Image (spheres, rainbow, N blue to C red):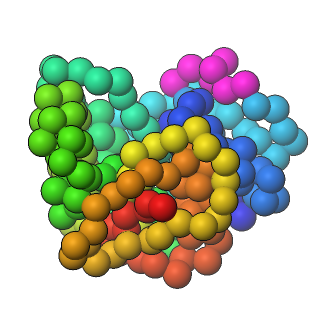
C-alpha cells in the first residue's frame, strides 16, 4: 500500500512513518523541510511540499492510496489557520477521488469530543493555551466532514512517548467518557491499521487507554 504522511518529521507523524515502513508499506512523506526527515529506508520517499499549497502535493497524491494528515503546531495565542487551510487543500485534491482515503489527526476537545478531556484539560489547559488551535481544528473537522466521503478523523487523548501496546480503546460514543492518555506509537498503530483495513469510516473516534 502507498501511504502519504503529511507532518512526518516529528510526533505522531514520525511514528506513523516508522510503523508504516515496519508493516511493509511504501511511505511518501510530504515535508516543507525534507532535511528534517531523519529516517532512511528503501520504501521511504520524501517530497518537498506544503499542505497549504495544493500544487506542491498534487502529483504526489496521485500515486497514493491513503493520505494521513498529522500536522501540528506549537502553543500560540495568535490566530491559527494551518489546520483549516490544510483541510481545504486536501478536500480540493481528494473530493473527486473517493477511492483515496483521508485519515486526519486532530485531538481530544475537537468537535463533539469537547468536554471529555477531564477537568484540568477542559477548564484550564485547553481554554488558556489551546483555544486558537482548537478553534481551527474544529473548522478543519467540519471541512473534512462536509467535503469528503472517504475519511476518518482520529482524536487522541493526552499524548505520551510510551511504547506501542496495541491495547487501547476506540470510542465513538462519548457518553460518560473522560479521556486519559495514549502513546504516539499506539496512535500510529491505529492509523496504519485503519489505512490497511478501513473498518471505520466517516466518523471521529477517540483513542485512549
Magenta span contains residue 75:
no
Compared with 78, 58 (above or below) is: below
Compared with 91, 1 (above or below) is: below
Magenta span contains residue 35:
yes
Quarter of the image holding residue 51? top left
Could you tell me which residue is drawn at 45 percent across and 71 percent down? 170
Query: Tag count in the figure?
Result: 0
Q: Which contiguous range is marked in magenta?
A: 32-38
Query: Residue 55, image x and y in percent?
Result: 44, 37
Quarter of the image holding residue 89? top left
Along the viewing direction, whichever of 63 and 154 lies nearer the viewer? 154
Q: Left or right? Give the position of 188 relative to 72.
A: right
Query: Residue 140, image x and y in percent?
Result: 25, 50
Could you tell me which residue is drawn at 55 percent across and 48 percent down? 183
Could you tell me which residue is drawn at 20 percent across and 28 percent down? 129
Along the viewing direction, whichever of 75 and 168 lies nearer the viewer? 168
Q: Left or right? Give the position of 59 relative to 73.
A: right
Compared with 139, 79 (above or below) is: above
Query: Residue 99, image x and y in percent?
Result: 51, 73
Could you tell me which residue is drawn at 44 percent across and 60 percent down? 208
Along the viewing direction, whichever of 91 and 158 lies nearer the viewer? 158
Amino acid at each position: 500500500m502507498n501511504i502519504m504522511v503529511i507532518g512526518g518529521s516529528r510526533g505522531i507523524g514520525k511514528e506513523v512513518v516508522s510503523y508504516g515502513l515496519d508493516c511493509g508499506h511504501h511511505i511518501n512523506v510530504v515535508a516543507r523541510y525534507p532535511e528534517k526527515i531523519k529516517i532512511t529506508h528503501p520504501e521511504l520517499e520524501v517530497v518537498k511540499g506544503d499542505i497549504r499549497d495544493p500544487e506542491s502535493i498534487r502529483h504526489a497524491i496521485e500515486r497514493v492510496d491513503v493520505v494521513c494528515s498529522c500536522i501540528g503546531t506549537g502553543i500560540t495565542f495568535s490566530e491559527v489557520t494551518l489546520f483549516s487551510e490544510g483541510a481545504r487543500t486536501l478536500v480540493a485534491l481528494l473530493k473527486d477521488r473517493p477511492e483515496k482515503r483521508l485519515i486526519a489527526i486532530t485531538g481530544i476537545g475537537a468537535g463533539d469530543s469537547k468536554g471529555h478531556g477531564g477537568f484540568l484539560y477542559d477548564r484550564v489547559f485547553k481554554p488558556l493555551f489551546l483555544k486558537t488551535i482548537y478553534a481551527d481544528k474544529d473548522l478543519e473537522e467540519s471541512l473534512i466532514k462536509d467535503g469528503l466521503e472517504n475519511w476518518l478523523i482520529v482524536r487522541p487523548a493526552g499524548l505520551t512517548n510510551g511504547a506501542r501496546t496495541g491495547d487501547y480503546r476506540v470510542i465513538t460514543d462519548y457518553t460518560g467518557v473522560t479521556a486519559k492518555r495514549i502513546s504516539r506509537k499506539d496512535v500510529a498503530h491505529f492509523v496504519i491499521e485503519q489505512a490497511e483495513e478501513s473498518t471505520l469510516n466517516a466518523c471521529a473516534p477517540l483513542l485512549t487507554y
